[in-house]
Amino acid sequence: MRMIPLYIDVAVMSATIEAIVGVVIAVSAFLIIRFRKAKKKVQETLHLEDTKETEEEVVLLDDEIVKTAAEAADGGAESFDGGPEIAQTGPEESTGA
């Protein structure tokens, strides 16, 4: 019987690659979480502020809410009804012989 040297089964390699990728993802997630926790602890210890920019909350006044709601209702009705009148083309009816 003749042996084929260095034969690697495709299913075994697929499972091996999946296992390696899974381990790499798990280790990466673990390290990222630990890094963020350590960074937060160092910032708290050294009394450093976070430099992330945050957007201010948008507050609408009552008049703006009513105006916006009215515009949305008008626009919604037009789009629901098909919008402005559109000339429909179809087969022409003949009235004569």
Image (spheres, helix red, strand yellow):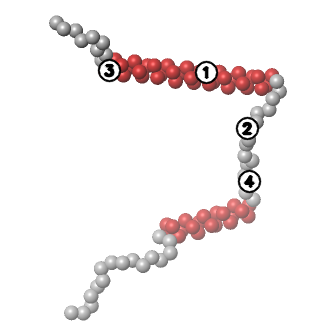
Q: Where is residue 2 in the image (x, y as percent from the top left)?
A: 18, 8
Going from N to C along the chain, the mark reached first, 4 or 1, is 1
Q: Which circle, 4 or 3, is nearer the viewer?
A: 3
Specify the farthest residue to the left.
1
Q: In this view, does 25 lie above or below 67?
A: above
Q: Mark 1 points at which residue?
A: 31
- Specify the label residue 11 is tagged with: 3
Going from N to C along the chain, the mark reached first, 2 or 1, is 1
Q: Mark 4 points at which residue?
A: 59
Q: Which circle, 4 or 2, is nearer the viewer?
A: 2
Q: Distance of mark 4 from mark 2, alpha carbons?
A: 22 Å
Q: Which circle, 4 or 1, is nearer the viewer?
A: 1
Q: Distance of mark 1 from mark 3, alpha carbons?
A: 30 Å
Q: Name the residue under label 2.
A: 52
Going from N to C along the chain, the mark reached first, 3 or 2, is 3
Query: Image point 30% across, 17% down: which residue?
Result: 9
Where disc 1 sits, the SS reads helix
Amino acid at dot 2: Lys
- Front residue of this view, candidates 31 and 7: 7
Query: Label 2 neighbourhood size at 10 Å, few (<14), some (14-19), many (20+)?
Result: few
Name the quadrant containing residue 28. Answer: top right
Query: Image point 16% across, 6% down: which residue?
Result: 1
Q: Is residue 42 above or below residue 96?
A: above
Query: Image point 69% across, 61% down: which residue?
Result: 65
Does residue 83 appear to the left or right of 33 in the view shown? left
Q: Do the residues labelled 4 and 3 touch (CB within 8 Å)?
A: no
Query: Label 3 neighbourhood size at 10 Å, few (<14), some (14-19), many (20+)?
Result: few
Amino acid at dot 1: Leu
